[in-house]
């Protein structure tokens, strides 16, 4: 079996509401091991909300997340980090005096 075809992360029927606003409606996403993806869309399309659900900042209201084939409950950023899921949020620069590589590399700080 080719491991590169195995889903690393799979989100199925993800739903998130903010009061009456249905921000994510039955969103499905799968990412295979070694795959690099980009998430693009219009403002207000739910990109940031989906990322916040995956990285544990926001709790999903309905749906399932699987990591390496196992259903997981990502209830906090720490639980996501324990799986190896981390997010670099959009900032112009985190530390302007450091290079991009040093801003990303945890060992450098």
Image (cartoon, grey):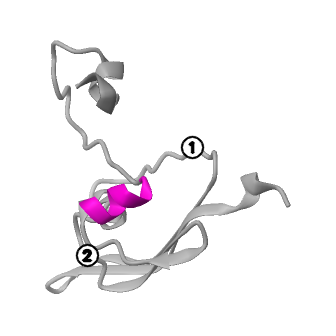
Left or right: 62, with 3 as reference point: left
Q: Is residue 39 above or below residue 80?
A: above
Which badge, 1 or 2, is on the more N-terminal residue? Answer: 1
Find the magenta span and give its range: 78-84
- Count every numbered label the image shows and give the total: 2
Q: Secondary structure at mark 1?
A: loop
Give the residue at mark 1: 36
Q: Position of residue 90 (x, y in %)?
A: 25, 40
Mark 1 packing: few (<14 Cα in 10 Å), some, or many (20+)? few
Q: Is residue 7 visible?
A: yes
Q: Position of residue 15 (x, y in %)?
A: 36, 81
In the picture, the disc for residue 53 is none
Q: Position of residue 97 (x, y in %)?
A: 16, 12
Q: Residue at x 85, y 61 (%)?
A: 1
Mark 2 packing: few (<14 Cα in 10 Å), some, or many (20+)? some
Q: Position of residue 18 (x, y in %)?
A: 17, 79
């Amino acid at each position: 079996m080719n491991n590169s075809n195995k889903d690393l992360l799979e989100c199925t029927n993800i739903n998130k509401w903010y009061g009456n606003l249905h921000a994510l409606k039955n969103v499905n996403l799968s990412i295979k091991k070694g795959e690099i993806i980009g998430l693009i869309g219009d403002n207000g399309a739910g990109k940031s909300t989906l990322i916040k659900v995956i990285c544990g900042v926001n709790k999903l209201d309905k749906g399932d997340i699987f990591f390496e084939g196992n259903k997981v409950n990502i209830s906090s950023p720490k639980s996501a980090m324990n799986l190896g899921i981390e997010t670099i949020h959009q900032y112009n620069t985190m530390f302007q005096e450091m290079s991009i590589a040093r801003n990303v590399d945890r060992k450098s700080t």
